[in-house]
Image (cartoon, grey):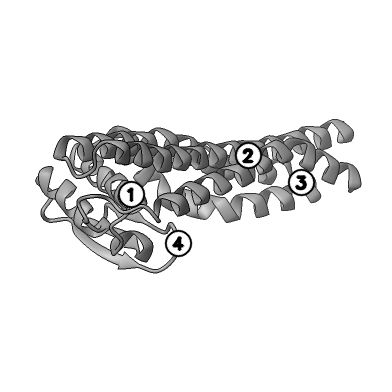
Amino acid sequence: MFAGYGLYFLISLPALLLGIYAQSKIRGSFNKYSRVRISSGLTGEQVARKVLDASNLTDVKIEQVRGTLSDHYDPRKKVLRLSQAVYSQPTIAAAGVAAHEAGHAIQHKTSYGPLALRSLMVPSVQLGSWLGPILFMLGFMMAIDNLAIIGLILFAGTALFAIVTIPVELDASKRAKKALASTGLVYGQELAGVDSVLDAAAVTYVAGAVQALSTLLYYGTIFMGGRRRRS
């Protein structure tokens, strides 16, 4: 058992440290630029509305939601949801996050491939993220290889989802920066602040993929070790 824990930490520790660093970086950058007002005086909601309207997305609604950094775009309902710190605040951080989420709506409109793929994967990932580890551990402990393999496959979908998320989020940030610059909503040194916030967010997407892959690697390693011991 202790050897298993040692293997887990050996494989997962780098990913865990990267995740802690990523969360610290995004929160630090967001908090820093949440204290810097943009010269236009527009709130995150107003910035998002202008970016959407400039892309002929007047049918996309904008709502306020609870939570910190809980901002997201719902392609099924065509609703852009912004947290309170973004929705009602005229700051560089709010403008960057709002434009980023509007970037997802633009992706949806243009049928951006990776976004469509990620949306298709959501139901299976929601199932596999919790059922996969359960089936794997049951199969592993009971020496039922087929059950363990099914669990591995289900969880592998979660890792694939995290990988697909990276280009989706990076592209949304690219669209956000372009929209903010071209519309003049943010300019000069304000754009550097937006870059800092969105680049910090990019690290969290990479960290999420690394964590999912490291967990999958751990499961695969102990599965193969178990098979060798039984053979």
Q: Residues within 10 Å of mark 1 (few under 14, many from 20)?
A: many
Query: Tag 1's secondary structure?
Result: helix
In whole angstroms, how far apart are the C-alphas of marks 2 and 4? 20 Å
First in residue order: circle 3 vs circle 2: 2
Which quarter of the picture shows residue 183?
top left
Is residue 150 something that shows in the picture? no
Which residue is identified by label 4? 68
Point 19% across, 37% down: residue: 110
Which residue is identified by label 2? 18
Left or right: 106 with respect to 167? left
Which quarter of the picture shows residue 121?
top left
Up-down relation of residue 63 to residue 149 (above or below) = below
Q: Amino acid at mark 3?
A: Phe
Query: Tag 2's secondary structure?
Result: helix
First in residue order: circle 4 vs circle 1: 4
Which residue is identified by label 3? 140
Which residue is identified by label 1? 92
Contact? badges 4 and 3 (CB < 8 Å) = no
